Image (cartoon, helix red, strand yellow):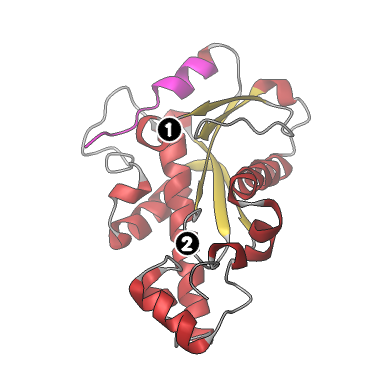
Amino acid sequence: MQFPTYKREEEKIQNGFHFVIGCDEVGAGPLAGPVVAAACILKSKTIGDTRSSDKWYYRVRDSKTVSEKEREELAEIIKQNCLCYAISEVEASEVDDINIHNASLLAMHRAVSSLLEKLNIKDHKKIFVFLDGKFRIEELSLEQEPVISGDSEILSISAASIIAKVYRDDLLRKIDKVFPNYGFARHKGYGTKEHIQAIQKNGVLDIHRKSFLKNIV
């Protein structure tokens, strides 16, 4: 299993950037629910040169490789060791309007923009952003670098992925209480057999991505 490091962030700090943001999105594949992105800045002073079991980030890694229970534990630890973090959503109707690729980028754009508002920093030249994936956010006027599999390599991105995943899972559990016949708490909106059968039996909801359901209903 691959564990991320803080090496890339440290290089940017040594090159004069005051803040290094990690950003990732989750929920691109589900049939229902929003795309969620998180952006965070880790407290560099809490991160040492080596990964050891006494470090807070020892278990932090790509959210897809972490169990639900462990993600929830790690999300709280990560938040305590963030200088600042922000979470954003792009709703299902927006996904239908602009497609999932653009929705994923929009979610990350919103997360970073929200983080900048919280920081209230005017000099954006001192801020660098690492994005998970292979695409830049063209509307974002910051130094940035997309990194394929960044959630496996860069600690800030891994941290953001966990924050986003825990937030989205919790949101789907809340949706499950409103629409208990769909099983959202279990499948989190993904296209499982249970979910597809529930759609066919109970109908399409506003939180469903209609563009994803063309071969289902």
Report which residue position mark 2 lands on. Answer: 30
Q: Which of the numbered marks, if any, corresponds to residue 76?
A: none
Seen from the viewer's position, the closer of residues 62 and 159 is 62
Seen from the viewer's position, the closer of residues 53 and 104 is 104
Give SS at disc 2: loop
Instruction: Compute the Cα span from label 1 to label 2.
Output: 21 Å
Image-based side of 91 in relation to 196, left or right? right
Q: Residues within 10 Å of mark 1 (few under 14, many from 20)?
A: many
The amino acid on which the numbered mark 1 sits, given as a three-letter code, is Gly
Q: Quadrant of residue 57?
A: top left
Asked if the magenta segment contains residue 90, the reply would be no
The region drawn magenta spans: 1-13
Q: Given contact means CB atoms under 8 Å apart, are the residues at marks 1 and 2 in contact?
A: no
Q: Quadrant of residue 15?
A: top right
Report which residue position mark 1 lands on. Answer: 150
The amino acid on which the numbered mark 2 sits, given as a three-letter code, is Pro
The N terminus, quarter of image: top left
